[in-house]
């Protein structure tokens, strides 16, 4: 019998996601939210619908998301959207009684790709090193978050994610 699922979310307008049991292989992809400009309500409604559908479809025991990162030139609208995605994820998890956790991207990058400063290409390479083929860096980041969470929350299954210096499986 499979263990309860973990849903990992790289929250952004292009939200990367990875979901699966710690003792199995994850499904993964990217959900592109609509370009709404300053219309945060429509943006939030689209995310809400998708998140509720994922919870219903996948029935995760834990949802973990990447802590929002606000760069120096982030607009107020972008900051509200990124913070809102995190806030809304926690809110929905509370309503649906799903455990929820936040993780910092730098620690995920260090675990998954060997460096807290790993760039998009390095995260994609690390994902491929595990036999996955994400279509973009958003899905690769979600896979890294999923693997890091499995390593921390189900260590008996997370040992398979031990990384070599190039971000692939350890020999």
Image (cartoon, rainbow, N blue to C red):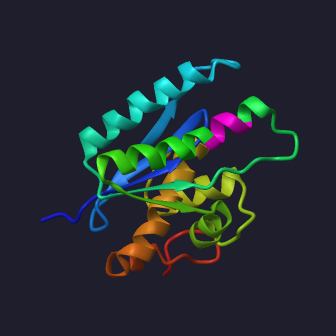
**Is residue 152 covered in magenta?**
no
Give above or below for 151 relative to 127.
Answer: below
Q: Residue at x 73, y 29 (%)?
A: 77
Work out whether residue 27 can be spotted.
no
Residue 31 or 25: which is nearer the viewer? Answer: 31
For the magenta stretch, what is the residue range?
A: 79-83
Q: Residue at x 56, y 22 (%)?
A: 41
Relative to residue 3, is residue 26 drawn left or right?
right
Residue 94 or 33: which is nearer the viewer? Answer: 94
Secondary structure mostly seen in magenta is helix
Give above or below for 4 relative to 12.
Answer: below
- Residue 8, position as x, y percentages in the image: 45, 53
Q: Residue at x 32, y 54 (%)?
A: 98
- Residue 43, position as x, y percentages in the image: 56, 24
- Furthest residue toward right: 73
Q: Residue at x 64, y 60 (%)?
A: 105
- Furthest residue toward left: 1
Residue 109 or 168: which is nearer the viewer? Answer: 109
- Residue 85, position as x, y percentages in the image: 56, 40
Quadrant of residue 78 in the image? top right
């Amino acid at each position: 019998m499979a263990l309860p699922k973990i849903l990992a979310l790289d929250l952004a307008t292009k939200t990367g996601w990875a979901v699966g049991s710690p003792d199995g292989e994850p499904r993964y992809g990217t959900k592109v939210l609509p370009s709404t400009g300053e219309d945060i309500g429509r943006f939030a409604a689209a995310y809400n619908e998708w998140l509720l559908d994922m919870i219903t479809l996948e029935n995760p025991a834990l949802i973990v998301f990447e802590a929002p990162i606000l760069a120096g030139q982030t607009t107020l609208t972008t900051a509200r959207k990124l913070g809102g995605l995190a806030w809304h994820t926690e809110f929905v998890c509370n309503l649906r009684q799903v455990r929820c956790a936040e993780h910092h991207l730098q620690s995920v990058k260090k675990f998954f790709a060997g460096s807290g400063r790993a760039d998009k290409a390095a995260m994609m390479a690390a994902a491929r090193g595990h036999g996955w083929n994400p279509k973009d860096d958003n899905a690769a980041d979600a896979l890294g978050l999923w693997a890091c969470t499995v390593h921390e929350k189900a260590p008996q299954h997370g040992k398979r994610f031990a990384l070599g210096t190039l971000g692939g499986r350890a020999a």
